[in-house]
Amino acid sequence: MIFWQSPQARVRYPERSVVPASTAAGLSGLEIIVDTREKDGYDFAYQPVRLVRHRLACGDYGVVHDGRLVAAVERKSLPDLAGSLANHRLEYALAELAALPRAAVVIEEDYGQLFALEHSREARIADRLARLQVRYQSVPIIFLGTRGLAQEWIYRFLGAARQWVVDELAAGSHIDGQPGNRALRSAPAAYSASESSVRRWAYTVGLPQPEKGPIRPEVWAAWRRTHPRG
């Protein structure tokens, strides 16, 4: 579902009011992977976080276990959201995020600002977003009003996801002697191959891709099935 804040909530939680009172899920040294393509990203200056830059399989921020991406968040500003809806990049991103055990998309703005965009048919943008949320219902799209609130939410979400992995692995080993549940075992490899490598591979197996434009989600999925650590 799509979440947003009311104007009253935005007043109650201004940009600099998000310094956490406690660590996420009690983790004192959460490692967050930041995609190398992420520009002007979060520094998590107020949180006990270790940032590692690497090209992620999908998303802008993620947590990794045993080489697999178990949770990720895609960050969007409002103009980026509008652009990615128009050129279908958001649909590709949601398709990839939906393959993860846990994922979300965070927007650094109030939902109401969708209807204040210039040079756009605002209702059409809102309709496209709603259709994508229905299609990819496992990946919530959350409007958080400010950059500070978005950073705080991502920190808490990834911390909770990392603790969930630990709990699931412990529960799985007690139940059947096997580490983790099916969702964790099927999580994709954390780090993405270069697009040129995937295009070359797709050509050799009869799935040619154009030299320009995004690689189709089903081709990425096929690559990851045949290169589980690639």
Image (cartoon, rainbow, N blue to C red):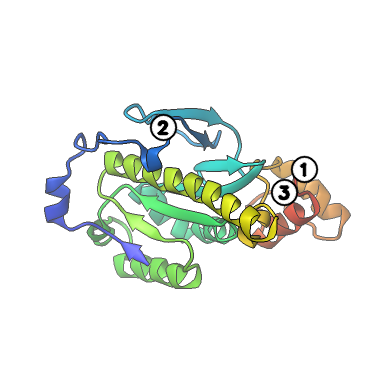
The correct choice, above or below, for 127 with respect to 13 in the image is below
Residue at point 17% right, 41% down? 14
Residue annotated with mark 2? 40
**Three-letter amino acid code of the residue under disc 2:** Asp
Residue situated in front as seen by the camera: 44 or 118: 44
Residue annotated with mark 1? 197
Query: Which numbered disc covers residue 91?
Result: none
- CA gap, disc 3 and disc 2: 28 Å
Residue situated in front as seen by the camera: 100 or 55: 100
Coordinates of residue 127 in the picture (x, y in percent): 37, 71
Coordinates of residue 71 in the picture (x, y in percent): 52, 49
Coordinates of residue 143 in the picture (x, y in percent): 31, 55
- CA gap, disc 2 and disc 1: 27 Å
Residue situated in front as seen by the camera: 85 or 141: 141
- CA gap, disc 3 and disc 1: 12 Å
SS at circle 3? loop
SS at circle 2? loop
Say which quadrant the N terminus sits in: bottom left
Residue annotated with mark 3? 211
Residue situated in front as seen by the camera: 197 or 229: 229
Q: Is residue 162 in view from this perspective?
A: yes
Q: Decide which of tag 3 and tag 2 comes sooner along the chain.
A: 2
SS at circle 1? helix
**Three-letter amino acid code of the residue under disc 3:** Glu
**Three-letter amino acid code of the residue under disc 1:** Ser
User: Which marked residue is nearer to the observer: mark 3 or mark 1?
Assistant: 1
The correct choice, above or below, for 95 with respect to 145 in the image is below
